[in-house]
Amino acid sequence: MTEPASTAVGGIALYKLGLIGLLGALIAAIVVMAMTIPKTVHEFSVALISTLMFSIGGGAFVIRWFELMAWANDLFGLIALLGLVFVCGLPGWVLVRAWFVYAEKRRSASLPDMVKEIKDATGL
């Protein structure tokens, strides 16, 4: 049977990581929305969801990829992880905003035509 104190410490660390990830994602969303305000409610919704998912998913991926879980053992490590989760959300906002600007300029083109144009331009 596991020792109760070690189980409680593990539970508290997991709880803190969840709050840190959510807080970083929310801060990233607020900052990027203050920089460039979306034009429509639909654009706002998509950009918000994308920013939050990039923050949470991308932050978790980077933390696992670079094996930074040990940083969660102290306050300064948690703050550093918060910053990392924050930074991971910014590309989501940029990609969504870029897509809306691109699609707005080519309103008459269909989605497959736009995807083909992007593939041709990037050489993929």
Image: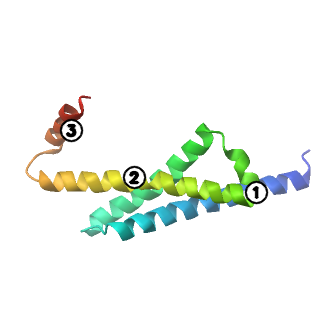
Q: Residue at position x 60%, y 58% from top?
A: 82
Residue 24 % position (x, y): 55, 61
Say left or right for 25 vs 19.
Answer: left
* Circle 1 SS class: loop
Asked which colour scheme the image uses, the reply is: rainbow
- Identify the mark nearer the N-term, 2 or 3: 2
Q: Mark 2 or 1 closer to N-term?
A: 1
Residue tagged by mark 3?
118
Q: Are marks 2 and 3 in contact (CB under 8 Å)?
A: no
Report which residue position mark 2 lands on: 92
The residue at the point 50 percent across, 66 percent down is 27
The location of residue 108, given as percent across then percent down, is 7, 51
66 displayed left or right of 50 = right
- Amino acid type at circle 2 is Gly
Residue 50 position in % (x across, y down): 40, 55
Whole-percent x, y for residue 89 in the image? 46, 55
Task: Say which amino acid is labelled 3.
Answer: Ile
Nearer to us: label 2 or label 1: 1
Q: Check disc 2 and report its element: helix, strand or loop.
A: helix
**Where is the C terminus found, in terms of image quarters?**
top left
Q: Determine whether label 2 and label 1 are within 8 Å by CB.
A: no
Closest to the camera, between mark 1 and mark 3, is: 1
Hey, what amino acid is under mark 1?
Asp
Residue, disc 1: 74
**Residue at 28% of width from left, 62% of height from top?**
43
Residue situated furthest top in the rendering: 124
User: Which mark, residue 37?
Assistant: none
In front of the other: 48 or 82: 82
The earlier-in-sequence mark between 1 and 3 is: 1
Q: How many marks?
A: 3
| Residue density around tag 2, few if under 14, some if 14–19, many if 20 or more, within 10 Å | many
Query: Would you call the spot at circle 1 few (<14 residues within 10 Å), some (14-19), or many (20 or more)?
Result: few
